Amino acid sequence: MNGPAHWAEADLILTGDADPCSYGCPHTGCPREMAMIGRAIAHGLLANTAAVIAANRLSPADRHEWQKAIDPEYAAEQAAEAAL
Ligand SMILES: [Zn+2]
């Protein structure tokens, strides 16, 4: 999993439609939800590490992948162009 993919995974966990706990607990903050938040933090840290290492040495292809991961509008435009 590369940096943009780690970013996307963290974003999906935190803002996606996925239920943080599939057990239907009536309260927030159950251990399973806490574990998912931990996973999101870990993915965010790995994404940050990848970005720091790449710094100003991003290839155009890598920059494209980061842009798709962090900018939903750009990702949608790229997907639309690819479908033509
Ligand atoms: Zn739960």
Image (cartoon, rainbow, N blue to C red):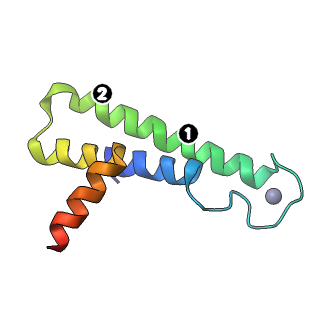
The answer to whether residue 23 is above or below residue 26 is below
Looking at the rendered structure, the secondary structure element under dot 2 is: helix
Disc 1: residue Cβ within 8 A of ligand 1's nearest atom: no
Crowd rating for badge 2 (residues with CA inside 10 Å; few <14, some 14–19, many 20+)? few
Question: Which of the four quarters of the rendered structure image does ligand 1 lie in?
Answer: bottom right
Q: Amino acid at mark 2?
A: Val
Left or right side of 47 for 82: left
Mark 2 CB in 8 Å range of ligand 1? Answer: no
Give the percent coordinates (x, y) of residue 75. 29, 54
Q: Is residue 84 above or below residue 29?
A: below
Q: Earlier in the sequence, mark 1 or mark 2?
A: 1
Residue 55 at what x, y percent from top left? 22, 27
Any mark on residue 6, and which?
none
Numbered badge on residue 52? 2
Give the position of the N terminus as an image quadrant.
bottom left
On the image, the x and y values in percent for residue 56 come to: 16, 26
Work out whether residue 65 or residue 74 is closer to the camera in this orientation and state it: 74
Q: Position of residue 16 (x, y in %)?
A: 55, 56
Q: Residue at x 19, y 73 (%)?
A: 83
| Residue at the (89%, 58%) spot, across then down | 26
Graded by Cα atoms within 10 Å as few (under 14), some (14 to 19) or many (20 or more), the crowding at tag 1 reads some
**Residue pictured at 79% horizontal, 50% vertical:** 31
Q: Residue, x 82% and y 66% (percent of image)?
A: 24
Q: At numbered mark 1, what does the secondary structure look like: helix, strand or loop?
A: helix
Q: Amino acid at mark 1?
A: Ile
The image quadrant of residue 63 is top left
Q: Residue furthest toward the bottom?
A: 84
Q: Which residue is mark 1?
A: 41
Q: Quadrant of the C terminus?
A: bottom left
